[in-house]
Image (cartoon, rainbow, N blue to C red):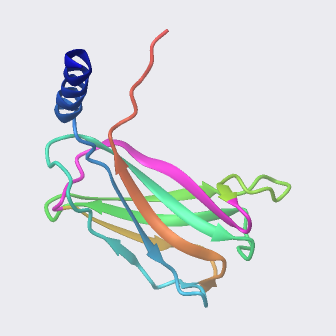
Amino acid sequence: MNKFLAIILTTLCLGACAPKHNDYSRFENIDTRGWAYGDTITIRPQGLDSVAPRQLSLAIRHNNRYEFRNLWLEVTYGDRRHMLRDTFNLDLADIYGRWHGKGLGPSYQYELTIAPRTNISDSSIVYIRHVMRVDTLKGIEQVGITVSAPAVKQTL
C-alpha cells in the first residue's frame, strides 16, 4: 500500500512541476453572406507570457462554396511600438481542386505559419484582411490565429 501511495504522490508532484502550456488560439466567425473586402478581423491575444518567443500561425476555415484555389491575406501584427505587415498567399487547393486543409465533410481548415519566432504577447494585436480582387468572398467560415511554442529543429 505504501508503494502505491508513493507512486501516486510522485506522479502528482511531477505533473505539478511540468511547464504550463502557454498557447493561444482564437477564431472569428465570418458572416454567412461573405467576407467583404473592407472587413478587417481584429484579434487581441490573451494570457501569453511576454518574454517567451512564440510561433504565430494563421488559420482559415472554409467550405466547398469557396471558389478559388488560393487566398491572399494581409496580416499586420505587433504591439503599439512595433507593427509588422506582410501579405500571404494561402494555397488552399491543388490544380485539380482538391483541398489541402484538414477537415470532415464540407468544412476544411488550412493553417500557415507566418512567423516562426516572434515576441507576441498580451499587448499585441493582429489584423487580418483579404486582398483578393473581389468585393465579397463566399465560403470562408472563420479566420483565426494560433500562437504556440516555436517548432524545435531536429538535427540528424
Residue 54 in the image: x percent, y percent?
29, 43
Q: Which residue appears at 40% of the width and 33% of the height? A: 151
Vertical side of 21 occupied by 36: above or below: below
Horizontal side of 48 relative to 89 (left or right) equals left
Q: Which residue appears at 24% of the width and 27% of the height? A: 8
Vertical side of 55 occupied by 10: above or below: above
Residue 28 position by quadrant: bottom left
Q: Which residue appears at 52% of the width and 72% of the height? A: 142
Task: Tell me which segment is drawn in magenta.
Answer: 104-123
Q: Can residue 58 be seen in this snapshot?
A: yes
Vertical side of 28 occupied by 21: above or below: above
Q: Quadrant of the N terminus?
A: top left
Q: Which residue appears at 53% of the width and 87% of the height? A: 31
* Residue that extends furthest to the bottom in the rendered view of this protein: 33
Residue 149 position by quadrant: top left
Residue 15 in the image: x percent, y percent?
23, 32
Q: Nearer the viewer, residue 141 or 96?
A: 141
Horizontal side of 73 relative to 46 (left or right) equals right
Horizontal side of 34 relative to 149 (left or right) equals right
Vertical side of 10 occupied by 126: above or below: below
Residue 50 in the image: x percent, y percent?
14, 49
How many numbered tags mark residues here?
0
* Residue that extends furthest to the front in the rendered view of this protein: 1
Residue 26 shown in magenta: no
Residue 83 position by quadrant: bottom left
Residue 105 in the image: x percent, y percent?
74, 65
- Magenta span: helix, strand or loop, mainly? strand
Residue 114 shown in magenta: yes
